Image: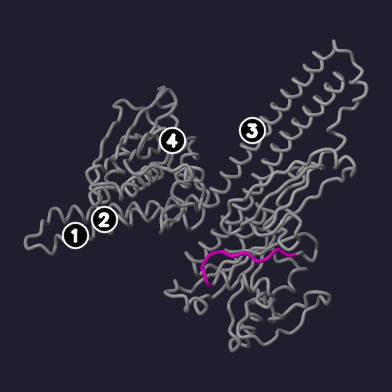
Amino acid sequence: MSSLIIVAALIASEINRLQREFVVQSAATYEIIRQRLDQNEAVMAGIDSLLHTFPGVDSRGLRDYAHRMLVRYPHIYMIELQPRVERAELPAFEAWAKAKISRGYLVKDYGYGDVRQWRPVAERPVYYPITFMEPQTKAALPVLGLDVYADDKFRAAIDETIRTGQPSLSTPFDLYEGGRAYLIFKVVYAQTPQDQASRPRLATRVVSMLIHTGKFLSSREKPPPLVSMHIYEQGYGYDQPEGLIDRVDAKPVASWLGRLLPEFTYREILPSQIQPFIFETRRQLGAEAIPVLPVALALIATFVIALLALVVYQQQVVSRRIARENQRRADRREAQVQVARLHTIGEMASGIAHELNQPLAAILSYNQACVRMLRESNPDLTAIEGAMKSMTDQAKRAADIIVRLRAFVSKHPAQVLPLDMRQVVRNALSLAEPWLRQGSVVVNLDMATDLPEVLADSVQIEQVALNLIRNAVEAMESTPVDNRVLTLGLKCDERVVTLSVRDTGPGVSEEMRKTLFHPFRTSKADGMGLGLTICQSIAETYGGSVIEDPSIPFGAEFQLRLPINQRRNAS
């Protein structure tokens, strides 16, 4: 009896170990899939920003960007453009396309189902034919001119993005060459619609991205052979093919073992707004959960129990060490992907819009002040002159930002020089003075007198400080006027200079803290969700970081940490 108890204990211990291993492996795979969905949204946002910010961008510029994204993210299978063509415009459009795109260009339909062949386009009120695709291989050339609006599963998604102005998702489908896929559509308006009725008329074209779900995971990233994985749409079940996004099947297990041993399940919702999928893995235990010689173990004398217990303990230690190493590798991989994604976003026009917003807002404030003073009976010309000079400074600052961003895109180095952080704070406060005055914010300074220099670009670091100050001022809009206090601190240790920006606003919730530094995540009605992401990217460029201190009892505190310029301070 005691031997049977020992065998049962060994099997139970092995099952527990396999379950922990299964959870760690599934969590790592889930994190990779989550990153792939974030990459899809970031690339679509980048294309949308490019087309909105530079409406005259030629196909070569768009193709260069699309090619870089396809090389970097293999699961993004194709990027396409489909203009809106009314029935009456079709002959003129085809003539234009033959001259500009291909001499054989025609708008056409495709016979889906059993008869797979091209056919003349049917008469419809509206068409959305393909005019651009990357990659444009020889085999894919016949796809040019295909009216994607003719397909029911695509038409619903196109109508949805036109109606909402947000990216929309097609139903998943099988690729002709094999594999599962879906399309992400995003409308491009000629101008911002003022009402719902004008949206179809202003929807000049639609951008689409074909996502090959079979390429979400490389061969090294796929689940182990004994683990199955299903990714499916919310509202569907694990085994419903209609909602299936991707699947990896496990090796079969003997049916009698499946009835005796448990099945592990890992299920998580992927936190994507436009790709609402469920990630689920399963593992049915088989012979690997049973010790090789259970009968022999049952016959082993009692004196070896201690030795067996030691073996089990060592297995658990090794399992925990493997789990920790896997987690560290997953963390490093996530950090590398995050840096690459932020670097790409930094090259996009949305970064230009965000960084220019602050000096332009300051120019607007100074201009309004000048107008008010000029309307007075005895205008203060000295004050007006000062405001005009401030506007000039802000315009120069905006020009500096444009020059720096152009240099960044051209791969030229920034102006990396020894930098006094106290001067950075003074410059940032000077720029933020209109916001502070308008918000009735009291500023407290707590700056150490003998601070070492850091090595960075002054314009970029001032931009980070100004962004943190502006976030703090906006966070205190709901705070009573008498309690609006902004505290700026500067301190250092042996290796790092820390700038802290603290406000007396409502603070950061636990839910918000989880995605605080994710791109396109914002709590502001008109926010772009790029401020803290860009700040973090700039800080990481110079070996630093931006963090939020969760230990603050009230309000919020963000810290910019930059390494000391060791060479300058040593000399």
Q: Earlier in the sequence, mark 3 or mark 2?
A: 3
Q: For this view, does 552 lie left or right of residue 337?
A: left
Q: State the separation of the CA atoms marked 2 and 4.
A: 38 Å
Residue 395 % position (x, y): 31, 56
Q: State the separation of the CA atoms marked 3 and 2.
A: 49 Å
Q: Earlier in the sequence, mark 4 or mark 1?
A: 1
Q: Residue at x 34, y 27 (%)?
A: 451
What's drawn in magenta, residue-wise? 163-173
Q: Secondary structure at mark 1?
A: helix
Mark 2 nearby-residue class (10 Å; few <14, some 14–19, many ≥20) = many
- Residue underneath mark 3: 328
Mark 4 nearby-residue class (10 Å; few <14, some 14–19, many ≥20) = some
Check if mark 2's residue and mark 1's residue have beta carbons within 8 Å. Answer: yes
Q: Residue at x 62, y 50 (%)?
A: 269
Q: Residue at x 31, y 47 (%)?
A: 476
Q: Secondary structure at mark 4?
A: loop
- Residue underneath mark 1: 370
Q: Amino acid at mark 4?
A: Pro
Between 298 and 384, the residue placed more toward the observer is 298
Q: For this view, does 427 lie left or right of residue 207?
A: left
- Residue underneath mark 2: 391
Q: Is residue 171 magenta?
A: yes
* Picture disc at residue 550: 4
Q: Amino acid at mark 1?
A: Cys
> Toward which corner of the image does residue 64 lie, by quadrant?
bottom right
Check if mark 1's residue and mark 3's residue have beta carbons within 8 Å. Answer: no
Observer-side mark, 4 or 1, equals 4
Q: State the separation of the CA atoms marked 2 and 1.
A: 10 Å
Q: State the separation of the CA atoms marked 1 and 3.
A: 57 Å
Q: For this view, does 120 lie left or right of residue 413?
A: right
Observer-side mark, 2 or 4, equals 4
Q: State the separation of the CA atoms marked 4 and 3.
A: 23 Å
